[in-house]
Amino acid sequence: MGEGSVKKLADIRRSAMAAIAATTLLAGCATRDTGAADVWDPLEGPNRFIFAINQTVDMIAIRPVSVLYRDWMPKPAQRSVHNAMQNLGEPVTALNDAVQGDGHQAMTSVARFLVNTTLGVAGLFDVATSFGLKKSDNDAGQTIGYYAGVQPENGGFYLMLPLIGPSNARDAVGLVADSAVDPFGIAIYSLSSSTAYWIYAGTRYGTTVIDTRVRTMTALDDLQRNSVDYYAALRSAYTQRRAEQIRLKRDRTSPQAELERRDNLALVR
Amino acid sequence: MLARRRNMLHLAAGAAAVVVAPRLAAADLDPAAQLIQRTASQVIELIKTRTGAARESGILQVLEADFDLNYMGRSALGVHWNQATPEQRDRFLKAAANAEAHAYAERFGQYGGQTLTLGRVTNRGGSSFVESKLNQSDGEPISITWEVRNEGQGPRIVDVKIEGVSMVMTRRSDFNSYIQNHGGKVESLIDELESRAKR
């Protein structure tokens, strides 16, 4: 077998992995490499329609409520709400850290959850960070991107999700995967009822929306004011940001990044 | 997902004005890092000492001196640059530089006591990339990478990447889409930018 066919085999294997990763529902990951400057958006028409609805809902409800929350809710309370939401996500984060082969960060995320749930009073206070347990920023979309073997800018086709916002095939699958393995969701669903589950999911979603909206207010206002096509600017920014997150996960395990980390460790010693 | 959006869109917060606290001795020697340090301290000085129109005109001066607004405009127009007539290019560069300058003036204006720590400098494809961290009083530090190039006028900033999001790349996507949705004509974009400047 020549070098060419080996490479081809590797390509096929990578493509197959990408296809599996994006699941049967949303194939297309492996077929097109899209740069951030020109995001693959075959559903642009429907996406823009949903974007317009999202924008309207934001203008009449989410943004005004977020402004009230930001200006009237005491800052420590806002921080605690944020911490609690982050803490609920910690088990799923740990799982993604583990699936990506980062055992150390997975253990750290588990430790964060245990510390913040107990000492941090149900996650209201982020005690773990002051203990030096670093927060991991991870999710299933990044896990798929980590293993997909394509440019991290390529997340399959771009998708504007109703009431959630920018996404793509990869991240939408990740979103579903993350909520499917959410231990609190599973526990509530199996111990109680589906009504209880929807109350939990709805409350968590609603709180996260307001918390996130407050935190993105300045940035989104800036992007909107300074763009001639806000939809396209947001699409590009989202794609680049997600690619960067995935790239950081990949670099962590790349030989060069590993060497640099060792260098840094040597400096510390 | 929503938490990700938060990270992704720290754009404006990240571009807010900064105090420089250089940490690495090597960073002091590199001309690119020196440029970033100088720009940041000039901006912070302006914000501390001036208000209103005086502040904005001061920031515009810094931008014109330290940013290669022509290069940024050209990269932002991408493939449409070649199709544009010399007259259109002139008008575009003027309008785009103006829009960019105002955007940065606004971002820099929202100073909230952040500090900037300079990190590694890497050279790639004729550009120097200066890594830095914007330390906030509340919340995680934001990573900002400054791309510095020398196009014959000494080192100038040609792009700012905030948490991986390139301002020029985002602008290019924005402009490109606008042109595509307006009959593929650069003229329509220039008209839009010019009319925005008048508002």
Image (cartoon, coloured by chain):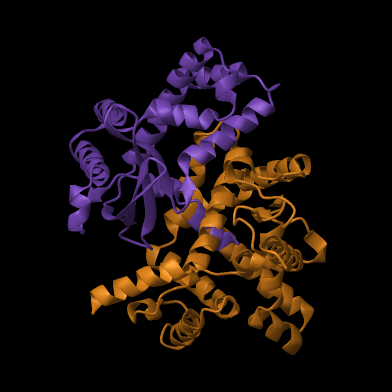
Chain colours: A orange, B purple
Q: Quadrant of residue A135?
A: bottom left
Percent across and percent down for residue A123 are 47, 79
Identify the residue shown where x is 48% and y is 27%: B74
The residue sitting at the top extreme is B87
Q: Is residue A19 left or right of residue B7?
A: right
Q: Is residue A80 left or right of residue B120?
A: right
Asked if residue A15 can be seen in this view, the reply is yes
Q: Is residue A266 above or below residue A29?
A: below
Q: Quadrant of residue A4?
A: bottom right
Percent across and percent down for residue A115 are 43, 86
Q: Quadrant of the C terminus of chain A?
A: bottom left
Percent across and percent down for residue A114 are 48, 87
In front of the other: A142 or A207: A142
In front of the other: A51 or A132: A132
Identify the residue shown where x is 48% and y is 65%: A251
Q: Is residue A75 above or below residue A228?
A: below
Q: Is residue A238 left or right of residue B183?
A: left
Identify the residue shown where x is 69% and y is 45%: A40
Percent across and percent down for residue A57 are 66, 47
